Image (spheres, rainbow, N blue to C red):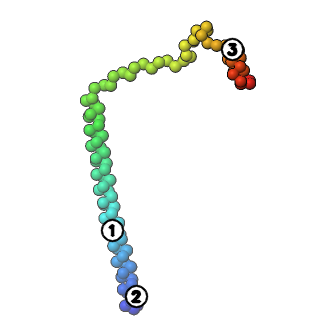
Amino acid sequence: MTKYDRERAETGFNKAAKSAEDAKGGKKDRDASAKAVLDNMARLKALRLAKEATAPAPAAAPAKMARGKPAKKSPGKTAGLGDWLSSQQSGGRRT
């Protein structure tokens, strides 16, 4: 094995060892940041639940109007279909 081949093999080995070491360190960093996020979420949830427990109960919402048929109009005030058709024809519309 020549000197060049030996140096090349050592470089490859060192590169692999360094990447493995970086991966372990990166995992530790990710784990630490994930734990910090989860701890913060738990703290905020506890604060929210404590605030909701001490807050007064919301007032009851007003009753909604029942949806149904609209109120009937008096028959004397509405025009019939025949009246409407004749007004359309006299207005220049053809039906």
Q: Nearer the viewer, residue 93 or 76?
A: 93
- The amino acid pointed to by label 3 is Asp
N-term-proximal mark, 2 vs 1: 2
When the figure is inspected, residue 42 is found, relative to residue 57, above or below; the finding is below
Q: Residue at x 30, y 60 (%)?
A: 29
Residue visible at 38% across and 79% down in the picture: 12
Amino acid at circle 2: Asp
Point out the residue furthest to the bottom here.
Answer: 2
Q: Residue 25's x, y, as percent? A: 31, 64
Which is nearer the N-term, disc 1 or disc 3?
A: 1
Residue 92 against residue 16 in the figure, above or below: above
* Mark 1–mark 3 CB contact (< 8 Å): no
Q: Which residue is mark 1?
A: 22
What whole-number distance in Å separates the C-alpha atoms at marks 1 and 3?
88 Å
Q: Quadrant of the C terminus?
A: top right
Q: Residue furthest right?
A: 94
Residue at left offset 27%, top offset 43%: 43
